[in-house]
Image (spheres, rainbow, N blue to C red):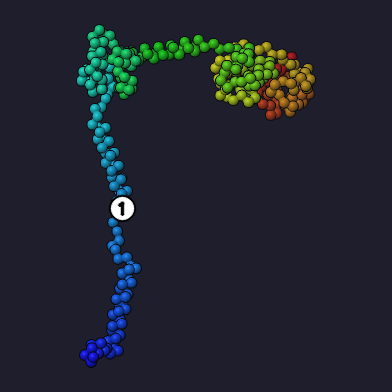
Amino acid sequence: MNIFKSHFSYNKRQRNGIFFLLFLIVAFQIAYFFIDFSPKNESKDYSNEMTSFLKEVDSLQEIKIENSKPKIYPFNPNYITDYKGYQLGMSVAEIDKLLEFRKSGTFINSTKQFQQVTGVNDSLLNIISPYFKFPQWVTTAAKNASKKIISETKSSAIIKDINTATLEELKCINGIGDKLGQRIISYRTKLQGFTFDDQLFEVWYLEKEVADKVLVNFKVLKKPVINKINVNKATFKEVLSIPYLDYELTKKIFQYRDEVAEIQSIEELKKIDDFPLEKFNRIALYLQAK
């Protein structure tokens, strides 16, 4: 027993050392379970840089492919050879048809005729036709023919007199219905007929775009005969009833007439203060001095 006691009996310093060792063991065990000692992944994300690099490679590849394609310069389709036709993507049969046509001594003078002779499809024609270069006399003749067609079309269009246009005729214009058509006729009646084409723009709620369409088919072909009023003899009410005149302007006209005793010429109205000179030609349609 004494032997065992000698092995398990410790002094105070030794016991403190044992307790400190146990404390360290427990502390390390706790640290092991609660602290993550795995190495952190500090590798840099290169995905965005790689994507940009691949895009740049693709663009360079596209440029290389584009540059490797044979360039097409303007050419006269009448002189396409076997090799040239092959480069353009034409089939052997299409090239043979062209060569056979040229043997007859005739020439192709338009893109449409080229397709009729060779039988190339629309997709190929759309690719190569911008490079067709016909002789100058061919293009000049085509332009003259086009101008002639346009001229004949314009001349064949029948222009009707807007002063005799019926409601049904006006309704044929896109944008004109029953109400708007009747409004045009009512304003025409108020004016005693349109004297100027641009008087149509004065119609209430008639948009300029629609008025322009009307004037394509209808114009003032025969000016109306307007009953003029003698400004020196007319009553206030008669002058006020004239289109383009309001109460204030009518009042100024009568004040001026009283000042000069008698208006010698309609041109004198321009002397009135604040007289709307831009409306003079329209107002003068309804007034006379003698």
Pick the front one: 278 or 186 = 186
Q: Secondary structure at mark 1?
A: loop
The image shows residue 136, relative to residue 54, as above or below, that is above
Which residue is depicted at the point 65% across and 25% down?
204
- Residue 128 can be seen, yes or no: yes
Q: Circle 1: is it few (<14), some (14-19), or many (20+) Cα within 10 Å?
A: few
Q: Quadrant of residue 69?
A: top left
Which residue is depicted at the point 72% across and 15% down?
228
Kind of residue indicated by mark 1: Asp
The image shows residue 146, relative to residue 259, as above or below, that is above
Q: Quadrant of residue 1?
A: bottom left
Which residue is depicted at the point 72% across and 20% down?
242
What is the residue that sits farthest to the front in this orientation? Answer: 1
Pick the front one: 285 or 222 = 222
The image shows residue 43, relative to residue 171, as above or below, that is below
Q: State the image coordinates of residue 12 (x, y, percent, origin top left).
A: 30, 89
Q: Quadrant of residue 68?
A: top left
The image shows residue 249, relative to residue 60, as above or below, that is above
Q: State the image coordinates of residue 266 (x, y, percent, origin top left).
A: 70, 19
Q: State the image coordinates of residue 123 (x, y, percent, origin top left).
A: 32, 22
- Residue 282 can be seen, yes or no: no
Which residue position holds label 1? 45
Pick the front one: 45 or 258 = 45
In the drawing, does residue 135 fall left or right of residue 193? left
Q: State the image coordinates of residue 131 (x, y, percent, origin top left).
A: 30, 22
Which residue is depicted at the point 75% across and 18% down?
231
Pick the front one: 177 or 201 = 177
